[in-house]
Image (tube, helix red, strand yellow):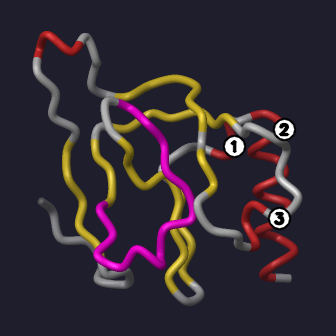
């Protein structure tokens, strides 16, 4: 585990899979995001959102209330979070076509 900035009660861990799983690290490509909690980032989001990922690590939230979405890659991991006024995504909105544009629009409207 790696220590982050301490802004969110969470830790960062590296994906680890058995070689027989066929799963590669980094996790790279399009994947579904399951919205677990309503929040401003996913307001009026398109159905069945998919986002683009490139990562070898993921966040483990100690407070389940901080989890906005999860994604399955060998197991469910936190793909977005909100803790007070801190927002984070594991995926790349800027590479995620209409889903990313909608999320970024929602973020801009939130902070503007």
Q: Is residue 71 highlighted in magenta?
A: yes
Expressed as whole percent of the image width and height from the top left, the position of residue 60 reads 29, 62
Magenta-colored span = 60-73
Asked whether, in this view, residue 71 is left or right of residue 101, the answer is left
Asked whether, in this view, residue 6 is left or right of residue 41, the answer is left
Q: How many marks?
A: 3
Circles 2 and 1: CB distance less than 8 Å? Answer: no
Which mark, residue 98? 2
Task: State the residue position of label 1.
Answer: 94
Kindly indicate the quadrant of the structure image that contains residue 69.
bottom right
Q: Residue at x 20, y 53 (%)?
A: 13
Tell me if mark 2 has few (under 14), some (14-19) or many (20+) residues whose alpha carbon lies within 10 angstroms of its own: some
Expressed as whole percent of the image width and height from the top left, the position of residue 102 reads 84, 52
Q: Residue at x 47, y 79 (%)?
A: 65
Tell me if mark 3 has few (under 14), some (14-19) or many (20+) residues whose alpha carbon lies within 10 angstroms of its own: few
Expressed as whole percent of the image width and height from the top left, the position of residue 1 reads 12, 59
Task: State the residue position of label 3.
Answer: 43
């Amino acid at each position: 585990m790696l220590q982050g900035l301490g802004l969110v009660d969470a830790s960062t861990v590296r994906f680890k899979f058995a070689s027989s799983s066929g799963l590669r690290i980094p996790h790279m490509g399009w994947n579904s995001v399951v919205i677990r909690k309503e929040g401003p980032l996913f307001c009026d989001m398109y159905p069945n959102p998919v986002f683009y990922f490139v990562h070898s690590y993921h966040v483990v939230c100690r407070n389940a209330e901080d989890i906005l979405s999860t994604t399955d890659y060998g197991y469910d991991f936190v793909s977005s979070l909100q803790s007070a006024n801190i927002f984070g995504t594991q995926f790349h909105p800027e590479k995620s076509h209409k889903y990313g544009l909608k999320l970024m629009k929602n973020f801009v409207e939130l902070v503007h």
